[in-house]
Image (spheres, rainbow, N blue to C red):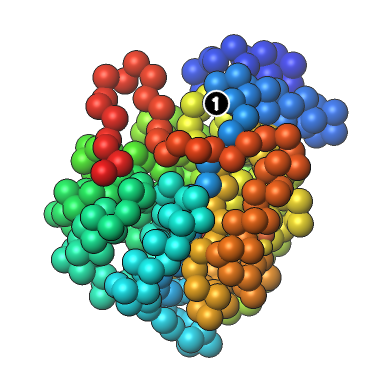
Amino acid sequence: MLSFSEALSAGTAGAAPALEWLVPLLDAKGGDETKLLAAADKLREKTLGNSVHLRGLIEFSNFCRKNCHYCGLRAANKKIKRYRLSKAEILATALKAEKLGYKTVVLQSGEDLYFSSEVMSEIIVELKNKTKLAVTLSLGERDEATYLAWRKAGADRYLLRIETTDRRVFREIHPDSDLEYRKNCLYTLKKLGYQLGSGVMAGLPGQDSTSLAKDIIWLHELGVEMAGIGPFLPHKETPLKDEKGGSLSQALRLIAVLRLVFPYAHMPATTAMGTIDPLGREKALEAGANVMMPNITPTEVRPYYEIYPNKICLDENADKCFGCVTARIIGLGRTVGTDYGHVIRKNSGIKEPNSR
Ligand code: SAM
Ligand code: SF4
Ligand code: FES
């Protein structure tokens, strides 16, 4: 392993991701940690500037067929009230978001097969006909034909976290999911031309800096264009209820290291960061992040999308959250992005997906 200074020099010089420099940076403490976050912040400013892109998050269904050991939406959790927004409600929410100034909506749900290839395609087509919004999907694992149908319907981007690439850790926490299958979903999404987002949770049981560094190397091989990470927050109605969970500082170091590895990727300051610390999203924006995903889900159903406890903004509405994040961004001396914030494909030769 390199020393911290050697590792930071390698990272800032754009070295290919390798354990020898990723691990010392992920383990940085005290003054070293401060230097790491500052270096990532500086690089973000150089490559992507000061604007922060807003993506309005619509949590449109909390039904889920899976039983991930960490997530409050798991099928076996009988204590949450399940809901699905109708097509009309999803469209109305998106139209409102566009009026507020959003350029992108993210449609996220549990793995709810009610939203079939056909049902979802109709929603995407109508969204694209009625608005100028870019559409990001995050509905979990589906087959290639379904991903293709949604892409053809007009979806621009897809978010599917790999969660961890450590085979043993993955198997322990995913009773009904397979690491190779999930990886294949990501390869397929990439092949279909989606702007591709993935990422991991930080602080899963059994994970360490070496496994996180291997995750980063895999995400780099995949060629991820949006990298979303957040701390794992234990939920009392799940098998992982007694685990410690992730820490703010570990998540910040991971964001910073990801920024060094992916100078142009879009990286959100996630809601989980705002949940673990009232200023967590600001801290993420100052450690390499350049995106925020305010909740625009109708207030009535927000409490039921409880993937982890104490989630922020449950009593708020779309206007309030839009105003709040805007003020936070301006408070940092940054600006709210006014363009689509599509992925930047430097020298890739890949044609930019059209937002329409
Ligand atoms: N069902 C889709 C999937 O799993 O990809 C999308 C929705 S899922 C709720 C979105 C993300 O929430 C997951 O990828 C996972 O990283 C995160 N998540 C779930 N439970 C969490 C927890 N307890 N703490 C932090 N993040 C969590
Ligand atoms: Fe379902 Fe996604 Fe939660 Fe797993 S993480 S239980 S797939 S909503
Ligand atoms: Fe919802 Fe601050 S982001 S109130």
Foreground pick, 211 / 220? 220
- For the C terminus, the image quarter is top left
Q: Residue at x 42, y 49 (%)?
A: 104
Is 28 left or right of 78, judged from the image as shown? right
Q: Determine crowd level at label 1: few under 14, some 14-19, many 20+ residues with C-alpha closer than 10 A.
A: some
Residue located beneath label 1 in the image: 48
**Residue 252 percent coordinates (x, y):** 68, 41
Establish if 119 lies above or below 10: below
Q: Residue at x 20, y 64 (%)?
A: 122
Q: Secondary structure at mark 1?
A: helix
Is 328 left or right of 351, judged from the image as shown? right
**Residue 276 percent coordinates (x, y):** 72, 58
- For the N terminus, the image quarter is top right
Foreground pick, 131 / 232? 131
Establish if 95 lies above or below 34: below
Which quadrant of the figure has residue 123?
Answer: bottom left
The residue type indicated by label 1 comes to Leu
Which quadrant of the figure has residue 331?
Answer: top right
Q: Residue at x 80, y 34 (%)?
A: 29
Q: Residue at x 60, y 56 (%)?
A: 322
Foreground pick, 16 / 37? 37
Which quadrant of the figure has residue 344?
Answer: top left
Would residue 64 be visible to someone looking at this image? Answer: no
